[in-house]
Image (cartoon, rainbow, N blue to C red):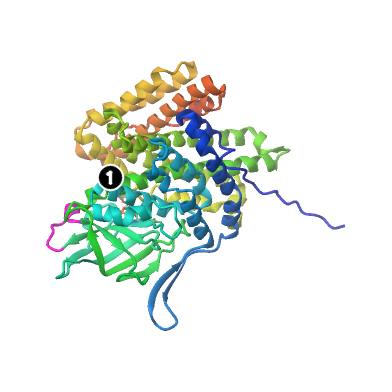
Amino acid sequence: MEIKPFNQPPPELGNQYKDDRVLHSYLKRNIPADIFQQIEPSLTEMGELAGGELYEMQLADRLKEPVLTQWNAWGERIDHIEVSPLWKKAEELAVKYGLVAAAYEKKFDRYSRIYQFALSYLFHPSSDVYTCPLAMTDGAARTLLQSGNQELIDRAVPHLTSRAPQQSWTSGQWMTESTGGSDVGRSETIARQDQDGQWRLYGRKWFTSATSSQMALTLARPEGNGSGGKGLALFYVETRDSEGRLQNILVNRLKDKLGTRKVPTAELTLNGTPAQLVMGIANGVANIVPMLQMTRTWNSVMAAATMRRGIAIARDYARKREAFGAPLSRQPLHVETLAGLQAEFEASFHLSFYLVELIGREENSQISEEQVQILRLLTSIAKLTTGRQAVHVASEVLEAFGGAGYVEDTGLPLLLRDSQVLPIWEGTTNVLALDMLRALNKDNSALEAFIHEIEQRLKSVSHPKLKKAGKIALDAAEHVQQWLAGQKERKLFEAGARRTALTLGRALALTLLIDHAQWSLDNENDARALAAAKRFAMSGIDLIQDINFDEAFILANDQ
Ligand SMILES: Cc1cc2nc3c(=O)[nH]c(=O)nc-3n(C[C@H](O)[C@H](O)[C@H](O)COP(=O)(O)OP(=O)(O)OC[C@H]3O[C@@H](n4cnc5c(N)ncnc54)[C@H](O)[C@@H]3O)c2cc1C
């Protein structure tokens, strides 16, 4: 008798918009009804694509990676990068749905940003990180618009924000050199002016994602300028000439990376690349900040999106997979494990979309002075908090699949590999925590505004369990304030930066979750956000501890 082996039904995804209670509820609350009606059809379409065609393509195209061809058959250096089929599809969809354009068309006033990021959040987990060039494109458009350089605005912004496939451009952001991605002030790329006044760049850029972009914003040191970040200038580069040839740019190789393998991240040599100054001959590191603000915001939202995707497939699988006589979805400890992940996700969602909301307000001059202060801290805080959450959740998601989570052709390991980049690029956890400290140092009012926001939101909360959770959030934020005030030594202050930033991030995320849970109880008669808030409150909000630096030094250096 032939024995038919057991085959486990795989996890499946439905419409990723319709299935997302958290996104739905957030939009219902935060977008006026008439705008919601207008945007919902495209969100539904994107949800369908993300759970259907794109997801299937992603699984089927798993092994198709970008290919760099440096020479053609006749010996000419071409450095052509052929991206994966899914990336080509993703490019087409990104332009069609206006994943960058929607923010600049401003059809929905300050809600345009929420709309843009809701679409991108749905798109991201099925796009093989095509959101990387989109983030930089958005950042480049914003940087150029804020630069006041009308010539470059007229030249590039219509392309960066276009919905026409033939017109649309993406942008790169070439900052990191082998001397340092955090300390970019050490960059070695030189800018020299020809006799006719044309600037040309000479140097090597060590990590350049989306090298297939039409333009890039980059940093280089005009000859004669001093050292450090102030001596660098911000330059605009068009990668190809009118014949389509790379403009004195050599693609040395594509990086062989742990994850984001569909993103063509390259090492480049700039060998006299023509470039234009964006705004002045110095202060490049300061001038590229609008780019970083946008890419860090994308990073935060995409971290939340990645968590949501992992949980969606783990949840579906738990209903199908049986162990010890019951589906995993009924096994108390598995239920408990998934619940913790859902709470992390919901907190990360509200934190990232709060950042998006403030950017929308800022761009439409509907922002209060206090919100401006909060925004100064929030970009770093949200990016570093959600980046770490995403890695934790992705790792747990893989474990929730048992051995299948470790097997490549399930498509699951991708989740962890692609998450691991989130705390690294656009500023590591430590570097962003130090950025935040610098912002706090300059002016105490940012932290005061931050804590005031927490207090204000908690004031309208009436459910006793939410009030209790709210106290945890407020106590944690106030603990940060006290701890900072008590630090006299610079090194202790710095050594505590990560704990400080993560505590503020988790405290604000909890507050936003509580605020939304109260709304959801009152308006939707739904207690799920309440459950998420209660659970998140118990999962480590206050991370502040006194630091014994001498001991830390002994341990770190093992001496
Ligand atoms: C897949 C991928 C794509 C990328 N794409 C791009 C791109 O398109 N453009 C671009 O410009 N860059 C890109 N990067 C580079 C990325 O932004 C940098 O790798 C990152 O900023 C860190 O810089 P680094 O690698 O030089 O590490 P380092 O700066 O050497 O940092 C090493 C470690 O030291 C820590 N550290 C540094 N300074 C301090 C300090 N003062 N106190 C405490 N800790 C500190 C950091 O947190 C980190 O853990 C990409 C990276 C990856 C992985």
The three-letter code of the residue at mark 1 reads Phe
List x then y, in percent, for residue 323: 69, 41
- Residue 156 occupies which quadrant of the picture? bottom left
Furthest-right residue in this view: 1
Q: Is residue 23 magenta?
A: no
Q: Main secondary structure of the magenta part?
A: loop
**Secondary structure under badge 1?**
helix
Q: Is residue 436 visible?
A: yes
Span of residues in magenta: 223-232
Q: Is residue 438 above or below residue 231?
A: above
Residue at 47% x, 26% y: name it. Answer: 516
- Residue nearer the viewer, 417 or 525: 525
Image coordinates for residue 73, horizontal then vertical, percent: 45, 82
| Residue 420, horizontal then vertical, whole percent | 44, 50
Question: In this picture, is 130 found above or below 14?
Answer: below
Q: How many marks?
A: 1
Q: Is residue 559 visible?
A: no
**Which residue is at 35% across, 38% downward?**
359
Q: Is residue 147 left or right of residue 224?
A: right
Residue tagged 1: 553
Of the 4 image quadrants, the one containing the N terminus is bottom right
Q: Is residue 532 above or below residue 300?
A: above
Report whether the residue tagged 1 is closer than 8 Å to ligand 1: no
Foreground residue among 447 and 556: 447
Give the camera-side residue of 335 and 470.
Answer: 470
Give the residue drawn at x 35%, y 57%: 172
Residue 540 image-quadrant placement: top left
Q: Position of residue 183 (x, y in %)?
A: 25, 53
Q: Is residue 224 magenta?
A: yes
| Mark 1 residue crowding within 10 angstroms, few (<14) / some (14–19) / many (20+) | few
